[in-house]
Each structure stands twice: as C-alpha cells, then as structure tokens.
Image (cartoon, rainbow, N blue to C red):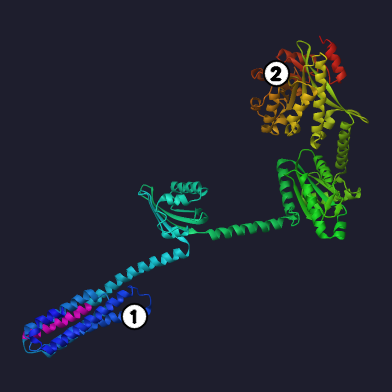
Amino acid sequence: MALFVLFIVKDFISTDNFYIILFMHTAVFVYRVYYLLEYKKSGDTLNTKEAIEYWTYIFRTGPLLTGIAWGSMLFFLDNVPFTYDLFVLLIITGIVSIGMSTLGTIFSVYLSLMLPSLMLSFLWLLMHLHDDPIFMILVVPFVVLMIYLIVSARRFATNYRQSFLQESRANLLNERMKLALDGSNTAISDWIIPLNELYISTSWKILLGYSDEELPNKLGTWLKQLHPDDRPILLSALREDLKNKKEIFETTYRLRRKDGSYIWVLGRTRIFYDKNGKPYRLIGTQTDITKRKLLEEMLYEQKESMAHLAHHDTLTQLPNRILLHDRLNQAIQKAKREKKKFAVLFLDLDHFKEINDTLGHDIGDKVLKEVATRFQSVMREEDTLARLGGDEFTIIMENLQDEQDASVLAQKLLHALAEPVVEKENTFYLSCSIGISLYPADGTSVQNLLKNADAAMYKAKEEGRSNFQFYSSEMTTLAFERVVMEASMRAGLKNGEFEVYYQPQLNAKKQKVVGMEALVRWNHPNTGLVFPSKFIPLAESTGFIIELDRYVIKTAMMQISRWYKEGLSPGVLALNLSSRQIRQQDSLEFLTITLAETECKAEWVEFEVTENELMQNMQEAIVVLTKMSKLGIAIAIDDFGTGYSSLSYLKKLPIDKLKIDQSFVQDLPNDAEDAAIIRAIIALAKALHLDLIAEGVEREEQKEFCVQNGCENIQGFYYSKAITKEKMQHILQVGLPDKS
C-alpha cells in the first residue's frame, strides 16, 4: 500500500524524502513481520500474565509505528496540488477505517494506529490551510469522521469483547466442568432413544481403564461392561421407572474395568418424555463410588462386629446375658402367642473354681470352650445356649411337647461331661448341676424364670451335684422316674425282658386268619407286665425306640418264618414303623439284612405307619417307603382318619392298605357320624383298590356292620387280644373258637 501511494505522489517528493519514507515503511514492515514470526513460534499460547502483557505491548507498538509512518508521509510532500491533498488524505482515512475492522477487536491497539495517523494528517491539514472555501469545508467532515471512527471503533470493540467474553465464559465453563468431572470421578452419557445413539464421555472410558478410541459409543458397550448380576436388576428398575413416568432414575451398579476388576458406580439419569409420554432421551452422570462402597462395607462389618461383641461372650462366642434376656423375652412372647411351653436350664460346673485356682485361667478358659462345644453337640439347633459368666451357662429349650423333655436334655448334658476333658498333660473329670424352670408354670417373666432355674440349680448342688432338679419338686420326681424307667428299659432289652405278642387278624366271612400284628410287651421283674402306653412315649423321646423297634422286627420275622417252615399259614405279619426308624439312614440296609438272616420273604411282611408319623417329614417318608415297597413289603396306613393330613398323600405314597381306627368303631352301629365316616373310608379304599381292615372290633354288632358295608378283615378283642407266640401257634394249628 505504501509503495502504491509513493508511486502516485512520486512527482511531489524529492529523492532524499522518497528514500526516507521508503525506509520508514520498510522498517515498520520488517518489525511487524519479525514479531509475527516470533509469535507463531511461541505456539499461539499465552499461559502467563507476563506473556500476555508482553505480546499486548508488541501489538500496540506495531500499529503505532505504522500510524506514524503513514501520518508523517504528508510532511515530505512538496507543492502538492489540492486534488492530491484530498486523494492522499482519503487513502489514509480509508486505511484507518480498514484498520478498525482488523484491529478494532482490541481497542487500545486500534488507537495505536488511528491516533498518530489521523492526528498527523489533521496537523498537516491545518498547516496547509488556505482560503479555498472547498478546502475549509472539508476540514469539518474530516474532524467528524475522526470522531465517528473513534466512537465506532469503541462500539465495535465493546461488542466484540462481549461476544468474546461470552465465548470465553462458555469455554471456561466447559473446562471447569471437565476438571470437576475428572476430579470427582464422574462421567457423562447421553442416549437419544429414537436414533439409538449413545454418547459416552471420555472420562467414563478412563474410569474403566480404556482410552477414548478403545470403546465405541454404543449401547452395547455399556451393557457389556455391566456386571452380569446387576444387569437384570438395573434394567428391571429402569423399565419400572419409565413405566411410572419418573423423571429421575438413580441406582448403583458395577462396571467391569479393563483389568477385569469391578468398580461401583452411582448413576443419576434425567429422563425426557415427548408429548405422547414416550421417553426419547436419557442424559446422566456416572460417579465412581467404589471407595465409598468399600468404606460402607468396612463400617457395616465394624458395626456387626461391635454388635456381636456386645451380645456374645468373647471366650466361647455364645450369647451373653444381654442377648439371653432378649431371646427369653422373644420366647415368652412366642409361647404366649402360640400357647406353648418352654424350659430354662441353669447350669453350673461343679468345683470348676479349683481348676482356675490351681492351673490358672488360661487352662480354665480352654476347658470352658470344650464344655461349651460338648453342650452344643447334644442340643437342638433351635435351642439357645448362653454363657452368663464364669462357669455358668443357661439354655432356652423352646416348643416343649412334654415338660419332661427338659429332663431328657438335662440327662444328655450330664452325659456330655461323662468323658474326661484332656488339656495338654492335664485330665479333668467334670460334672455340672442343672436347675430347670418351666414357662408358664414357674414364671412368666425373664427375671422369675432365671431366678427359679437358679434356685433349682442350688437344690441340685444340695442333692450331691452332678444331677438336675426342677423348680417344682413334683416335676423332679417325675423326671427321676423317667430316668429310672429309661435305665430299666435299656437293661430290660439286654436281659430279655421284652417279649413280642401277636394279635390275630381274620377274614370275618371266612373265619380264617389272614395275618397278625406284632406288639411288644415288657415283663418287668418287679412290676410285672408293662403295656406299651407306659413306656413307648419315653422310648420315642429318648431314641430308645430305634433299638426296641429293631428287636421286635427281627424277633417277629424269625417267628413268622418258622411258622411258614412248619407248614402253618400265619398270613401277613404287620409291624409298626416309627418316624425315627424311617429317618435312620441304615433302615433299608437293616431290613434287607434282617430279611435275609431270618429267611423271611418280603411278601410276608407289612409295615404300619400312622398319618402323624408320615406328616413329620413327608418327602423323606415317600422316598424310604417307596424303596421298601420295591423290596416287596406292603405299606399300611394305621389309625386312618385321625391324623391332620391331606388325602393327596394317598396317591404319592406306595400304600397297599388302610386300617380303620378303633375310635370310629367303638360306637358302631349306633353313632351315625362314625357309621358315615366308615362307609366313606370303605368307599375310598375300594375306589383306590386298597385293602381294608378294621381294628378295635369288640362286639358282634360292630363286626356285622363292618362286614355288611364291605370291610371283611377284622382285628380286635372280639376274636382275640394280643397273645404270646405259643398261644398264637395254637390258633394257627387248631383255629379260633367258632363265634357263630
């Protein structure tokens, strides 16, 4: 531009002035080009306040020198015609105007160019002022133009600054958000549902240990990283919130990192719906809360540990006094609600203080832990064993069927200490004294039950230790009677005091023996014959029933086999099978071996099981009885109609016979309800193709009613009570007396 102007006015410039002007413009040009290159080398990055101030100074200096060079050109012109004056002035003004659009973005830089150019031009104009009216008129618009350019440049710079500041603020906010997200382990996602487009921020991928290029922005990427266990739960919850038009969806889940580990994430999503109520966009954040989760787990474990320490004995890990009181309260409320009984057993080790005093507490503690283990081994899972401190223990025994069951547990606890405790080189022979209180007979509060059990325990110590006492003396007497009877039963089995009796079963129409039921009797050496009702309940509660059952089964099988070998026709041998026998793991093995040893055929044998016995564990009973049936043994339901059960078991179990209970027979034929029940049972048996027998038949009219309604097989005193094997053999040989 400078060369163009010089070319126009060359005729009015001397050679010396021409080179001066050319030198000025060349120097300014070199100056500005040099710093332009230096600025580009700096990477166009202004990182410090000093650098910004330095380059602002350079930018101001360049336009300032340019303005001086242009403005001073007028002073080197000689004898310029008026037209040329105007032309040069217009060129300078135009250059300044163009500068406003290029440099006006920074007002101070624009002034650096404009002020020297216009001020020098205005000065030159005044110096060459003459009387030409046109020239005088031009001075006024020139001044106005100068003012307009300054004002316009100011407004232009203000508008630009506002626009620049808005853009800078937006960029700054973006940078701050990015820094905040990076610092808080938070990522952003944006899912546009109609387009199935998902944006996942780079920070999300960095959280998982990936670079931005390694994971595509696809919905499948997020689903793939989601923990398999969390996926159905999260998607189900999201569907539920979308269904309920929730605007905020918040949940926690796990995402898999690149190294295979998982991090916990808190997701908060804003859901947008269209006018039809359909979701079209989900924008959310995902925050890494792994550390928080770990802290929560640690605090939870500490809380659980503290709660355990507060409620358990540190030595044995058993419930302590606090937890015992709580469980006793619960037991009282439950027993009151369900109208049941329970027992509290207070145990104190005999002479334990001597162990601590002679061998120290370390040895004593180890002995206490062994004692606690032994006590736990003889208790039911639902019972509570607590250590109150020192050598005192307490047991809560709930759901008592019989109050004397507490004495059975007491016996087991005493037996648990029968074996000596060996600790290193020391052998300890321990015993304990046990006091028992019963709810509600001996108290209905925690304090009374514990106090009375404690009093009973001291009574046990007064009785010579190593025994148990009930708070009620009558209960203690009954308990000792049970203990004596149990010992007598076990001794009686060894001494051959138990004998198998047989009650014949007949076909009333044919007056023929079709079988017999084996029943046990106890020939006590002191009290004489003891009937089952006196000892069977005790045998069942103590577990002695298993030994007794097996004795009866083996003895009866040997006898029935012997009768068949002698050519007699004893029919089918009916044997009672207890629920304990069913639950024995070796019950099938025992039967198989016994059948072989006694040479008794399976088809000669029938097992009778009561409904109530079956209901104790139906599934287990189905399995065991099915296997017995496969051996060829028949299965009969004893006391049919008296149990609390569903008739559906009739098709699940391998049943061959129903035995009508004597409670329905005793009032026949006068009781209409009993008659209706028996007719219904007979009809049911015929429909299911099952055999039938009525027990407890004592009179002619009872027998006649059963036979006339379709039940021909009879068992009861009408024909015979249970008799010895010798008398049964006589009946098999000569038959029963004619009842007609």
Q: Earlier in the sequence, mark 1 or mark 2?
A: 1
Residue 718 lies in what quarter of the image?
A: top right
Instruction: Give the amino acid at mark 2.
Output: Asp
- Say which residue label 1 marks: 53
Q: Is residue 386 magenta?
A: no
The residue positioned 79% from the left and 33% from the top of the image is 546
On the image, the x and y values in percent for residue 408 come to 82, 41
The residue positioned 17% from the left and 78% from the top of the image is 95
Q: Alpha carbon of mark 1 to alpha carbon of mark 2: how far?
A: 114 Å
Instruction: Give the amino acid at mark 1.
Output: Glu
Residue nearer the viewer, 605 or 237 = 605
Label 1 element class? helix
Callout count: 2
Q: Does the magenta stretch include residue 142?
A: yes
Q: How crowded is mark 2: few (under 14 residues within 10 Å), some or many (20 or more)?
A: some
- Say which residue label 2 marks: 691
On the image, the x and y values in percent for residue 280 come to 37, 50
| Quadrant of the frame with the N terminus | bottom left
Residue bounds of the magenta highlight: 133-151
Residue 117 visible to an observer of this rendering: no
The residue positioned 14% from the left and 80% from the top of the image is 3
On the image, the x and y values in percent for residue 571 come to 77, 16
Residue 595 lies in what quarter of the image?
A: top right
